[in-house]
Amino acid sequence: FRKFCAAHSADGLKCSSAGSGPAQVAVAIKTAIAALEGEVVPQEVKLPLAIAEDPNMKEGTDYFPKESDNFFVGNSFPTCGINFSAQEIMGQTKENQ
């Protein structure tokens, strides 16, 4: 969707995109492991959505033209100790996961 928006922005298309990315799963897994290890965990965790809006969508940050249409970013929650870039995700292979 973001690639489509960027491709047609010059034609007057205005878009706003929000969604969850892989980092939200990482936060959930990290919290579950902490709970299983007996740590006190919050009963509620609020994570912001990854939001991008025209005209501020940036190639290589908010969308990746060379990646598949379903590739989504939203990989950083520093307060939860989760911060990985799209490049780190794309650089993973079956052998180095």
Image (cartoon, grey):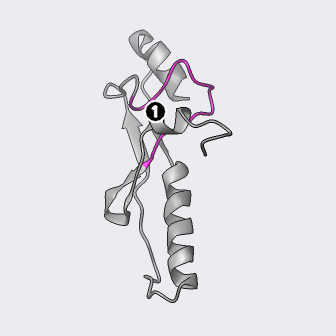
Residue 67 is situated, as x and y percent measured from the top left of the image, at 57, 24
Would residue 34 appear left or right of 60 to someone viewing this image? right
Q: Amino acid at mark 1?
A: Gln
Q: Using the image, determine if residue 38 lies above or below residue 90.
A: below
Q: Nearer the viewer, residue 80 or 43?
A: 80
Q: Assign a secondary structure to mark 1.
A: helix
Q: Residue at x 49, y 64 (%)?
A: 27
Q: Is residue 22 magenta?
A: no
Q: Residue at x 48, y 14 (%)?
A: 8
Q: Nearer the viewer, residue 84 or 28?
A: 84
Mark 1 crowd level (few <14, some 14–19, many ≥20, 10 Å Cα)? few
Label 1 sits on residue: 87
Q: Residue at x 52, y 22 (%)?
A: 3
Residue 32 is situated, as x and y percent measured from the top left of the image, at 56, 75
Residue 71 is situated, as x and y percent measured from the top left of the image, at 58, 33
**Segment tinted magenta in the rendering:** 61-75
- Secondary structure mostly seen in magenta is loop
Q: Nearer the viewer, residue 44 or 37?
A: 37
Q: Residue at x 39, y 37 (%)?
A: 52
Quarter holding residue 57: top left
Would residue 78 appear left or right of 16 to someone viewing this image? left
Residue 26 is situated, as x and y percent measured from the top left of the image, at 52, 59
Quarter holding residue 33: bottom right
Q: Quadrant of the N terminus?
A: top right
Residue found at the very far right of the displayed protein:
94
Q: Nearer the viewer, residue 91 or 20?
A: 91
